[in-house]
Amino acid sequence: MGTASSTESPSVKRVAGYCYQCVAGPDLFKVKVEDGVATAIEPNFDAEGVHPADGRVCVKAFGLVQKTYNPNRVLTPMKRTNPKKGRDEDPGFVPISWDEALDLIADKLNTVRANGLLDASGYPRVAASFGGGGTPTAYMGTFPAFLSAWGPVDLSFGSGQGVKCTHSEHLYGELWHRAFTVCPDTPRTKYIVSFGSNIEASGGVCGVWRHAEARVEQGVKRVQVEPHLSVTGGCSAEWVPIKPKTDPAFMHAMIHVMLFENARTRLDIDFLKHMTASPYLVAPNGYYLRDPDTRKPLVWDLKRAAAVPFDTADTDPALEGCFAANGLELGADGERFEHTGVSVSTAFGKLLEHEREFTPEWAAKVCDVPAGTIRRVANEYLDHAQIGATIEIEGRTLPLRPVAITLGKTVNNGWGGYDCCWARTLMACLVGALDVPGGTIGTTVRLNRPASDRQSSAKPGPDGFMDYPFNPTDKENWVSRPQIRNANRTLVPLVANSAWSAALGPTHLAWMQQRHGFENFPEPTQPDVWFFYRTNPVISFWDTPQVAEAVSKFPFVVAFTYTRDETNHFADVLLPDCTDLEGLQLIRIGGTKYVEQFWDKQGFALRQPAVVPQGETRDFTWITTELARRTGVLENYNKAINKGAAGVPLKGANYDYSLPLDQAHSVETIWDASCRAASAELTGGAEEHGLDWWREHGFRTIDYPRLQWYLYPHLVDNGMRFEMPYQERILRVGTELGRRLHEAGIQWWDRQLGEYRALPEFHDFSQLIKDAVIANLGGQEEDFPFWLLTARSMQYAWGGNVSLQVVRGAAANVAGHRGVIMNPASARRLGIEDGDLIEVRSPLRATRGRVVLRQGIRPDTLLMIGQFDHWVTPTAKDFGVTSMNSLVPMLLDLTDATGSAGDIVPVGVKRVGGGQ
């Protein structure tokens, strides 16, 4: 428990709160308040031993004081007076009262309800977009309850999903080991191969803290494989400058070395036989050979010299070999193939056939990394795996495999993402390092239900793997008519149907349809009302001018607003909410929520007003309750709060703090009930602490079992296996999806259908991307000799701090924030010097910025850190720093089967001016 009081002087107090500006949080802090004015953000050292970084916060939190008192804040509701919407149009915003603003919005919403919640195309008339990987829910109070009460809402207008997040990892990670994101077991690992995972920037204070301790205390070696030297590469033992988007070749070659250049005994044979699908027999049509009676997949038992169901007791399954067996093969759409004496091989045997050609020498030609380097890294991975080692965790003996492989965005997004996610997971299985101490482990779940913890949703399926909620692809149940504009349930079986699924479909389809429709798809429409909060897609998405054009045509836009920015430039109403130091909200903390956020505790933390809200800003819960009252959904809104839509169910087995349904409740009443329910939840109903207690103490936690960090013991206890290496389910659902789409006359998703293979088919993804961009937009390959990439900035991650001078000052100390990073040798060839003004042109369009020359980047690569090119946002608009987003097209040919694409585009460069 923390304490928020201070005896320093009567005029000075310290108020507990949290920073959740990016997914690397929440971090717990205290606000120093002097005479009612916030003067400093300090670590909350009451959280020592509770928070993974002992109560420290990252650089973004220290900007919150300036964020509160920013003179550029919007401090009163405003409405647009200029009906014309365009980049060059002055919106003519004028201040209005809260009553006028809320009545204006309620009138639009009530008209929507009167006309029907769905339009003629079947799409919701109300849409909403939120940024920051779900972090806005930690600031928008009860707004999720309002959305639940309202009815269908289209959440598919993305603000960066699919390219800025680790999209493919989310889907494949949850399929294979309930891992929405993947992480090393940093406190116990010894060797990490990081393919572009910029953890020292994206992992927040917990990531920096844990990895620093790992290097110092454990002697961890981290090999950073990426085209440019990130801050993570700078902190690593080795940097391997790989050609952009060729990571699959490197990983396939690592697998080859492990399988063909080392004795089989160097692998974890027991793990492969009993914890994976490696011994499953594969029939001639590519599906598992099954027992005709139970339909369970068969393995070849060496003890019986016969094919038996995989879960037969006392077996020694063959890992390799071809066998003659009888059985049933079940294909797509219930197809049956009965086999007698058919020749079958194991899934592991199929893997050997698949990987045989991917030698390090082959990979070296693709990824421009010496074969010796690839071979050494693979062997070092094996050397550190400690096959056979064990460790005791909370009284249970588990395997210890201190090796891990991590992937960054772009590596696991778009074409090649399937290969990389599969290869990373497979290599963990080859040494028994998947979801065990020291190895590659998962964090939270978002697509599987319940999402309370990973183990709860990991339930046995019929084939020995975890069941998975694929969107249906059979003829009877396929969702043929998209329910939202990105058609996630229609096009992407893997995305499931959870509250997060809408944001993880092919989000750019929603934006693309605003310009043109797709053959044999519903007529594209605009939402009647679009809400957005803590996101700026006119800056953060692909092809930002196209996004701006689409937003400019939306009939009614409501922006929850901090300062003016590029997206709310097109809004009709601006609503200023309380910021981090002014609002009230309770959130869950602890457990294994995100990369490096592995806690030994779990509980709740309170955000509370440390200072009086500035101007006419209002608490988000107050705004939401008023909207619910004025739109006639108050009863359902209160029901949603009672069920837990605001973060904690108000009724449990031993307590009930449910709110009456027939009245509008104050902000304090809602959160007081939430605080009491949280206390009761943590204590099994034994204790009841209201809002005043939580204001004083700030947070409360209980123990979180470290065994919960690992999925392996849960699988062992429930007789389940990891679905590696062979992806029979992906093959089946992909075949069925293709049939459904073709029956509906849809051919434009065929390239994506090609990715549904039991073993990923390698392509030169770098060349594939370049060919797709040029084929769609024109130009010659020689005109675009460079690859343009981006990288995360800890200072600016998620974009919420771009208007703060103090953050700008901190970022200036990190190389690359002032311009386009380029290799000096490449610059010399083009007559470019450090600080020169250059034009960077993709086949789509051009942008200009200052060049920053650094040795730590490949000669064929350029880098633009962060997402800038602002033209409205105060302070940021004066940076003069570019963004790659205006140069990257939205194209189906760049979209993979999960609906994602990579942050990469081919470009050319020329000097257009001298240095500053």
Image (cartoon, grey):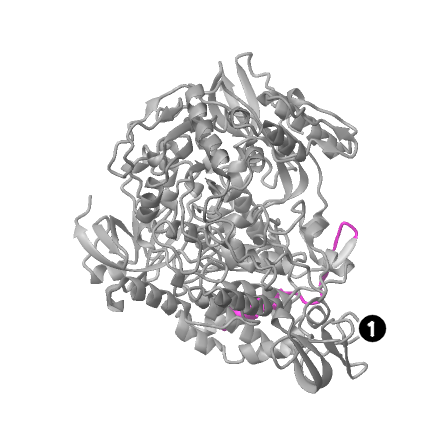
Name the residue type under label 1.
Asp
Q: Foreground: 354 or 618?
A: 618
Q: Give yes or no for residue 391 being in the magenta stretch.
A: yes
- Residue 878 is left or right of residue 252, and the answer is left
Task: Name, please, the residue furthest toward the left.
Answer: 913
Under circle 1, the secondary element is loop
Q: Residue 336 placed where, x, y %?
A: 67, 76
* Extent of the magenta region: 375-395
Mark 1 surroundings within 10 Å by alpha-carbon count, few (fewer than 14), some (14 through 19), many (20 or more):
few
On the image, which quarter does residue 318 sit in? bottom right
**Left or right side of 227 for 462:** right
Residue 847, percent from left and from top:
25, 50
Horizontal and vertical percent position of residue 697: 64, 25
Query: Looking at the picture, how far across and down is residue 600, in whole percent?
Result: 68, 43
In this rendered view, identify the residue nearer to me: 58 or 524: 524
Label total for image: 1
In the image, 900 versus 751, the foreground residue is: 751
Q: Is residue 464 magenta?
A: no
